Amino acid sequence: MQELTHFIGGEHVKGTSGRFSDVFNPATGEVEKRCPLASAAEVRAAVENARAAQPGWAAQNPQKRARVMMKFVALLQRDMDKLAEALSREHGKTLPDARGDVQRGLEVAEFCIGAPHLLKGEYTEGAGPGIDMYSMRQPVGVAAGITPFNFPAMIPMWKFCPAIACGNAFILKPSERDPSVPLMLAELMLEAGAPPGVLNVVNGDKEAVDAVLDDPDIAAVGFVGSTPIAHYVYSRGTAAGKRVQCFGGAKNHMIVMPDADMDQAVDALVGAGYGAAGERCMAVSVAVPVGEETADRLVEKLIPRVESLKIGPYTAGEDVDFGPIVTKEALARIKGLVDRGVEEGAELKVDGRNFRLQGYESGNFMGGCLFDRVTKDMDIYKTEIFGPVLSVVRAKSYDEGLALAMDHEYGNGVAIFTRDGDAARDFANRINIGMVGINVPIPVPLAYHTFGGWKKSGFGDLNQHGPDAFKFYTRTKTVTARWPSGVKEGAEFSIPTMG
Ligand code: NAD
């Protein structure tokens, strides 16, 4: 069986802790690889490599670093199919979806080609007599990223591309459930011209994460994953004096107004609710039709669509709607939550719990589930299910629908489907959620905007990618310079003002 490695100082390095986790093919349920779980000493070795590489990398002029990003983009395009195949094999998502995962990361690398422009500072000439003032953005030094299983290409690239373009060295601790693609990305960065040690991949679990959080030489940590771990990483990392941003779980609502184009809304809900088996932080997991009549029409149209979803392994062709769940544990958890919903009295209109796929009986497959008449006190409404399960919560009015989304503890994404510009505008204005779609079910901002949720979906300030990432991975230094001409003045004892 293949034993994966870490990637430290530009080389594949075997794990030495003696601890491993199994990497499965979720479609077959078979273990295909072993992933080494780093000890604190192995994390430290990566940090030392990063520390040694960082000053030289930061000293290269920004356009040279941008050229590395440019080459990296070209290599991602060259290897797109290879990366997508490796990704689908460990994650389970379909090949077109896996290509999207790579593409959405690639677009952040593309944005980072603009680093020379984004890193330009500010300058005030003549801030006082003979005084000029300028601010520059300098890299923080060594930064780290801890990433989830559900986007093993995109999210690592959201983290390391801007960090590296700013002149930092980076330690990536990807998910131990699908670690192959992050290792391939590190090889490509090296091939693109990033010096050894600029991007290191350390595989591992809590032990590696804690070592990252406690390491005095890591200045900034970006995390994406579930909310309890996001909160933990934020608390421990900031207590150690680091700059930390953590993005957590979600429960994304889609409000369907009575005037919405119902076919469009149903298409949107099916794609956004069940795509990637619902294992997306921007998946729509709650549909909120406004008014009983809207709800009846919506549910009636949704049932046959959910019943006819095409589920299969990524090898079954491009028209599969979604694949298996990432692990057996995750599958059992999702089915357990569906059981709970039935116990709580929600109406299970489509039951995918007993779905079986011939030839893949050991795979982690389940069918789509659709609940109607879910209420806000139920566990299935409060909990992030992270599976192919859509809950319909009926609202009597627009205000009730708005309040539902606003009162939920998560605040990642939300959408409204309507033909009424006034309602859409009011919604976008009042909602307390970070990313809003108007007739767009999954409003993931493009690379040159920023991505981030509110409430329990995000800890710390500044968002991911876009201009915010360049702020997160740099520190501002402001220089006040005076080149006196003529008579020298004596000491000044009160705070200088420029008059
Ligand atoms: P997870 O929290 O289990 O794992 C995320 C990372 O934390 C992994 O690298 C993992 O190794 C590490 N980790 C796990 N347990 C830990 C512990 N006890 N101590 C320290 N580190 C630990 O998340 P996941 O299951 O990989 O990913 C799914 C979650 O991520 C969902 O909740 C989803 O909503 C969220 N997510 C959020 C966003 C966002 O931008 N808000 C994007 C994608 C996924």
Image: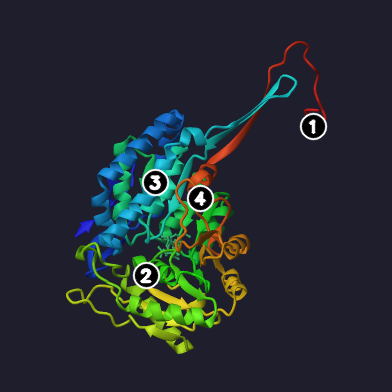
x, y (%) of residue 93?
30, 63
Residue 44 appearing in the image:
no
Q: Tell me the element at label 4.
A: loop
Work out whether 185 lies above or below 138.
below
- Residue at image mark 3: 107
x, y (%) of residue 217?
49, 44
Residue 354 appearing in the image:
yes
Q: Nearer the viewer's eye, disc 4 or disc 1?
A: 4
Q: Amino acid at mark 1?
A: Ile
Q: Disc 4 versus disc 1: distance between alpha carbons?
A: 38 Å
Choose the circle earlier in sequence order: 4 or 2: 2
Residue drawn at point x = 48 percent, y = 80 percent: 295
- Residue at image mark 1: 495
Q: Amino acid at mark 4?
A: Thr
Q: Disc 3 versus disc 4: distance between alpha carbons?
A: 12 Å
Q: Quadrant of the C terminus?
A: top right
Q: Which mark is residue 274?
A: 2
Q: Disc 3 versus disc 1: distance between alpha carbons?
A: 47 Å
Q: Disc 1 versus disc 2: distance between alpha carbons?
A: 61 Å
Q: Disc 4 versus disc 2: distance between alpha carbons?
A: 25 Å
Q: Amino acid at mark 3?
A: Glu
Residue drawn at point x = 44 percent, y = 38 percent: 165
- Residue at image mark 4: 450
The response on whether ligand 1 sits within 8 Å of label 1 is no
Residue nearer the viewer, 150 or 291: 291
Ligand 1's image quarter is bottom left
Q: Disc 2 versus disc 3: distance between alpha carbons?
A: 24 Å
Work out whether 380 lies above or below 50.
below
Choose the circle earlier in sequence order: 4 or 1: 4
